[in-house]
Image: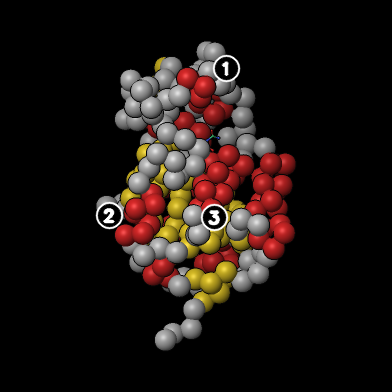
Amino acid sequence: PAAVVEVDAVPGPFALPVGEVALVVIDMQRDFLLPGGFGETLGNDVGQLAAVVPPLQRVIAAARAAGMLVIHTREGHRPDLSDLPPAKLRRGKPSMRIGDPGPYGRILIRGEYGHDIVDDLAPIEGEIVLDKPGKGAFYATDLAEILQGHGITRLIVTGVTTEVCVHTTVREANDRGYDCLVLSDCVGSYFPEFQRVGLQMIAAQGGIFGWVADSAALLEHLP
Ligand code: C5J
């Protein structure tokens, strides 16, 4: 059998049996990323997130060329808010809560312009778009069944935000037996400090719940 490629990562090499690896792109939605959008309205610096787009475009293109399974997630809720726990609804500024009219449609509501993925990273035909009501991509979704059906054992995780939906998803995946590689320049946080420490947390203690590498280390091994 052909030797399995290994990506140079922290805390050590991350094996890349391409047919068993899925690229997961988390919540690259207009509501979080666009200037004037929901994320910025909350006082966040969306520039921190925009920096993720160019390297992530390169990674998605390479994953497609390698024939990898690509999964895009979107955080959001049904228009009638029936899948929105009251505890989640109460979070945030009273004037800008989930379901309220926002700069790009009702905030984080499925079907609204702001809920969808930014144009530069739009999914293509055949890719999976997974709508999730929570921070983790496994909670109340069929992600586990999708991964099992495709024979996936390892995930490359990208998207926003590093310390929230990326962390929650990687922790969920780790507990379910998946090895996860997080790409440091393809995940973003509104807070530089959370970005730095969030990445450190993943790979600390011998890779307590994953591996971390930059996109260049992965792209070396993809077409
Ligand atoms: C947040 C996310 N931060 N996608 N969502 O609320 O990380």
Task: Name the element at disc 3.
Answer: helix
Instruction: From the top left corner, tell me how far across and down residue 26 is, in percent.
Output: 47, 45
Camera-side mark, 3 or 2: 3
- Please name the colour scheme applied to the rendered image: secondary structure
Give the quadrant of the C terminus: bottom left
Give the quadrant of the N terminus: bottom left
Q: Residues within 10 Å of mark 1 (few under 14, many from 20)?
A: few
Residue 126 is marked as 2
The residues bearing labels 3 and 2 have C-alpha atoms spaced at a distance of 26 Å
Q: Are marks 1 and 3 in contact (CB under 8 Å)?
A: no
Instruction: From the top left corner, tell me how far across and down residue 97 is, in percent.
Output: 49, 19
Taking depth in this image into account, of 25 and 122 the one nearest to the observer is: 25
In the image, taking residue 86 as reference, residue 189 lies left or right, namely: right
Task: Name the element at disc 1.
Answer: loop
Instruction: From the top left corner, tell me how far across and down residue 90 is, in percent.
Output: 53, 18
Q: Can you say whether 155 is above or below 111 in the image?
A: below
Q: Which residue is mark 1?
A: 93
Q: How many marks?
A: 3
Q: Which residue is mark 3?
A: 174
Q: Residue 14's image quarter?
A: bottom right
Q: Is residue 117 visible?
A: no
Q: Which residue, as the protein is rendered here, is positioned at the far left? A: 125
Residue at image point 49% right, 78% down: 4
Q: Can you say whether 199 is above or below 29 in the image?
A: below
Disc 2 residue lies near ligand 1 with CB under 8 A: no
Q: Amino acid at mark 1?
A: Lys
Sequence-first tag of 2 and 1: 1
Taking depth in this image into account, of 15 and 117 the one nearest to the observer is: 15
Q: Amino acid at mark 2?
A: Gly
Sequence-first tag of 1 and 3: 1
Camera-side mark, 1 or 3: 3
Residue at image point 50% right, 59% down: 177
